[in-house]
Image (cartoon, rainbow, N blue to C red):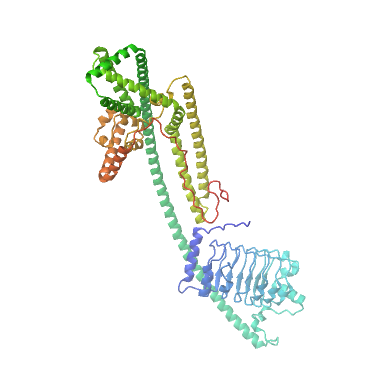
Amino acid sequence: MPLFFRKKKPSEDARKRLEFQMCLAKEAGADDILDISKCELSEVPYGAFATCKVLQKKVLIIHTNNLTSLVPKSCSLLSLITMKVLDLHDNQLASLDIGQLTSLQVLNLERNLLKCLPQSIGDLAQLQMLNVKGNRLKDLPATVSGLRSLRTLDISENVLQELPRVLAHVRTLEMLTLDASSMTYPSPDICSAGTESIQRFLCKECGIAYYPPSQYVLPTLESDGGGTSVDGVDRAVLKYLEEESEWQNKFSDYEKRKEKKMQEKLEFERRLNMGQREHALLVQQINSQKDEILQTVREDQVRLEEGLTKHQRYLEEERLKLLQQLKQAEQGITSRIQKLLEDNQRQKQSSDILKSLENERIRMEQLMAITQEETEHLRRREVASAMQQMLAESYKNKLIQMAYESRRQDLVNQACSSLAEMDQKFQQILAWQQLDQNKAVSQILQQIEMQKAAFEALQVKKDLMHRQIRNQIKLIETELLQLTQLELKRQELDTETLQGVITEQRQALGYLLQQLLKEKKEREEELRQILLEMEAKSETKQENYWLIQAKSGSLPCVLQEEGLEQQLVNLLIELSAEQYVPVFAHHRISVQALSTMTASDLEKIGVTEAGLQRAILKRAQEILAVAKTIPELLRTVEAEVRAAPEPSAPFEEPLSPAVPTAPPLQWEEKKSECVVCMEQEVR
């Protein structure tokens, strides 16, 4: 698999310098020089080639960069066809092919990584100066003999040990710089004697006569017959001197313009540094202000957390007190039920009294002349009333039992004192209730397994800890869904910026989800163990055990919440006051009635927290205000309350298993890795 190395991006100063030099080169009246040196370039930008081609630039300076090649893939060397001076020193060039730059006169390749010069170097017939100092050259190509105009050649600080003999054909060479001590051919003595000594030696080796460079200024001075006249040479020398002075003038002008550009660059850099210092000072001030704001926020957060901790501690104490009161009330109810059962037992034993009461009932029936139709109607009405009382909610059962006890006590007193008229009705009602109770007990005993299953389902559903674990699982599933959508979006955009952050979040959420599932399983096991212990207690031949447990409060407060408006229940849950749901249900308080109540009224029914009283009253008024604005909402809620059927049993259907809330992903035609297990193939 190929490796791709990311290129180092230029610094901000280098980028600004490049933009400044490019804009300077494109200005009207600009000279023939393009200077993009010290810009930290890894390749020559396309704009530089285009500028040289369009504006016919003749001097290109690209030294002190990180170039590894001169021509990028998207550019052509022919864009530099008019170039006369090319400065590439202090780069990282390992190879170079510039044979197409036939107009080139000065080439500076000092301090690069060149191991050899290209064979096309001989095509540069107009090249006058070649500097390859500080490279890794081992030899010079034979094509250097084609450099007919070369005047200066610097090959020092290389690993070069031999000079090619064909260098003798470069008749215009005036200065040759090399490391004489490391040369083997020619010998160090000859190399130390100077350029003329080296050229004489090479001409002798090639078998040609040596002539001084002044006679071979340019290749065009050579005649067709191979000889030159004295006048022609003088004219050529004069022409050469004129061209030399003109070139010196141009070079001095170039140096002046270069100095001017350097001053402008220094002024630009000075202004840039001032702007950067101002920016740094502004950033420092912003950071100090940010730190002060963060410190203030931290202090406020600490104060809020302390107040919240105190309030939670107070709520916990109130909850414990309320639980103690509920336990005491449950114990009182249990004792009263036990007394009722004992009274019923004593009534069964007093058969004589019942017989006498039955005789009296017959006598009173004859006296009152009650018709059979009225008796049947009365019996049906009482049976329906008794069935309705048995199927009522838990908080109604208490009131019904108290009314039943008071009514029974009145009837017993009347029977003992005056054998009054209502004794027979009481006995008849008592017999019917006993019959219905026996039927209900037999039916419940037959469906004991169903009651047990319903009890277990209600215990799991209404268990507070189990519900909190389910809510946390739903939240984590929602977070995983959002991460899934973010992962899919990242794949569509083909970016890897947030890959590490998404992976860490996914691992953390996955670990938390496993912990919650484990806690949910452990909680279900604890509830199942509690159920087994209760079942073991039920094996003590106690009749109607599950029904007694449901009435005594072992089941969650489901029956106490029946009949309460859903909006009121949602209001209490929203304000974290679920413990007051049975209180509101006991007093039959609706949202409309709550809006007319005051804080003292709520305190009377048991809501003692002042802040919670104000929050409940305010929220109820807001709900009524919304209902007045949208009357259909209020009518819909009232219709739901009226249409709600009475419960047929103190149990609900078993809970359905939890289903993940995350929707199924819609896969596209392309295959991508799984967002959960990060595998390539999705299973």
Residue 324 in view in this figure: no
Q: Between residues 328 and 147, which one lies in front from this camera angle?
A: 328
Left or right: 212 as drawn, with respect to 680:
right
The residue sitting at the left extreme is 368
Where does the N terminus fall, quadrant-wise?
bottom right
Q: Is residue 58 above or below residue 592?
A: below
The quarter of the displayed image where residue 654 is located:
top left
Q: Is residue 111 above or below residue 322?
A: below
Q: Residue at x 40, y 41 (%)?
A: 295
Instruction: From the top left corner, tell me how far across and down residue 230 is, in percent.
Output: 67, 87
Instruction: From the top left corner, tell me how far across and down residue 282 is, in percent.
Output: 41, 52
Q: Between residues 538 and 572, which one lies in front from this camera angle?
A: 538
Left or right: 620 as drawn, with respect to 66:
left
Q: Between residues 178 and 167, which one lies in front from this camera angle?
A: 167
The quarter of the displayed image where residue 394 is located:
top left
Residue 359 in view in this figure: yes
Q: Residue at x 74, y 80 (%)?
A: 209
Instruction: From the top left corner, tell me how far across and down residue 524 is, in percent.
Output: 49, 32
Instruction: From the top left corner, tell me how far across and down residue 595 is, in percent.
Output: 25, 36
Q: Residue at x 46, y 71 (%)?
A: 27
Q: Between residues 267 and 388, which one lies in front from this camera angle?
A: 388
